[in-house]
Amino acid sequence: MLLHNHIPITPLPLRNPNRRRNAAVSANFAVSDDSLSSRGFTFHRTTENLNLDHLNSVFAAVGFPRRDPDKIRLALQHTDALLWIEYEKTRRPVAFARATGDGVFNAIIWDVVVDPSFQGIGLGKAVMERLVTELLEKGINNIALYSEPRVLGFYRPLGFVADPDGIRGMVYSRKQKKK
């Protein structure tokens, strides 16, 4: 049972400083760090200071189901890369995305959310551009994501395509037996 508003989470080592970077990756972002900082936004790449109740509120605000904070904590412990944006005035997360994968070839981006009151100002693009760049810098070139059909248009300008080269994804689904 959740008794406190803030759940401490051990910060994750998201970058390996000894790992060779992919020199071909260009970090030319549509919205600069300075621009976002001047508007009161701060980027974070670890779970340190991430309030899971506040993150859960953002999930719910965009239509995701509320999640058990212990399960969120466990998912974050198994996350290879994440990025979240904090609004300095409220000290709350307003944008978030994370990626899991094998750390070498493949990654999947999950849980891309922007608080509805902060949508339309470039935060989603800022999070996605930086997360994809981090994965590419690690040499991970096969990057997939799960998305609601209604927001596919957001991801296309960022380089994502549906069914490239006729590749079709599949998802395991256990159907309920009729009684």
Image (cartoon, grey):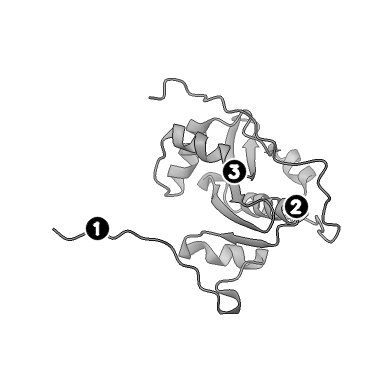
> In the shown orientation, is residue 131 left or right of residue 23?
left
Q: 167 above or below 64?
A: below
Nearer-N-terminus badge (3/2)? 3
Residue 102 picture location, percent across and down: 63, 52
Tell me the residue that label 1 is attached to. 176
Is residue 45 or residue 149 the one in the foreground?
45
Is residue 29 or residue 169 the one in the foreground?
169
Q: Quadrant of the N terminus?
A: top left
| Distance between mark 3 and mark 2 Cα atoms | 15 Å
**Kind of residue at disc 3:** Thr
Label 1 neighbourhood size at 10 Å, few (<14), some (14-19), many (20+)? few
Residue 124 picture location, percent across and down: 62, 52
The part of the image, by quadrant, that contains residue 159 is bottom right
SS at mark 1 in the image:
loop
Tell me the residue that label 3 is attached to. 79
Q: Quadrant of the C terminus?
A: bottom left
Tell me the residue that label 2 is attached to. 138
SS at mark 2 in the image:
loop
Nearer-N-terminus badge (3/1)? 3
SS at mark 3 in the image:
loop
Nearer-N-terminus badge (2/1)? 2
Label 3 neighbourhood size at 10 Å, few (<14), some (14-19), many (20+)? some
Residue 16 picture location, percent across and down: 77, 41
Q: 135 above or below 40?
A: below
Residue in the image at 59% along x and 43% along y: 79
The answer to whether the residue labelled 3 contacts the one labelled 1, judged by CB atoms less than 8 Å apart, is no
Label 2 neighbourhood size at 10 Å, few (<14), some (14-19), many (20+)? some
Residue in the image at 51% along x and 32% along y: 52
